[in-house]
Image: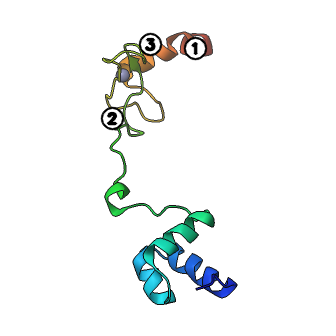
């Protein structure tokens, strides 16, 4: 069968809606799953994510806005992590690390 513009449009729509290649072949009629896949490939239609891969990657370090971001260790080394203590209100670090980070600035601001 020929890939008429109508059939190509239908393929693109069904593909975009997440129908499988065999389902699309069935709806178009007169074609095969392999032909649908081949045509989709030639049209550069995006590969649809398989359901298995939809799980988001679990981040290695879960950080929230309320956790101290003071780095501990070296970013290129395995033991590297963030402090993770509760932050002071409106600041990115816990009390200890706020003192370390802002002491100089606060002293000069207070003068
Ligand atoms: Zn801290």
Task: Judge left or right: residue 46 versus residue 9.
Answer: left
Distance, label 3 to label 2, CA atoms, is: 26 Å
Task: State which tag comes first along the sequence, 1 or 3.
Answer: 3
The residue sitting at 47% across, 81% down in the picture is 24
Task: Judge left or right: residue 20 versus residue 35.
Answer: left
Report which residue position mark 3 lands on. 100
Report which residue position mark 1 lands on. 105
Front residue of this view, candidates 69 and 26 = 26
Report which residue position mark 2 lands on. 60
Distance, label 2 to label 1, CA atoms, is: 33 Å
Dot 1, crowdedness within 10 Å: few (<14), some or many (≥20)? few
- Quadrant of ligand 1: it is top left
User: The N terminus lies in which quarter of the figure?
Assistant: bottom right
> Residue 91 placed where, x, y %?
47, 30
**Disc 1 CB within 8 Å of nearest ligand 1 atom:** no
The residue sitting at 49% across, 16% down in the picture is 101
């Amino acid at each position: 069968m020929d890939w008429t513009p109508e059939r190509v449009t239908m393929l693109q729509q069904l593909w975009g809606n997440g129908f499988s290649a065999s389902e699309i072949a069935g709806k178009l009629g007169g074609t095969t799953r392999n032909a649908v896949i081949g045509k989709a490939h030639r049209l550069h239609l995006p590969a649809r994510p398989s359901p298995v891969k939809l799980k988001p990657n679990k981040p290695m370090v879960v950080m929230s806005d309320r956790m101290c971001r003071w780095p501990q260790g070296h970013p290129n080394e395995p033991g590297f992590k963030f402090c993770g203590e509760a932050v002071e209100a409106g600041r990115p670090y816990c009390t200890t690390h706020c003192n370390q980070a802002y002491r100089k600035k606060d002293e000069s601001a207070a003068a």
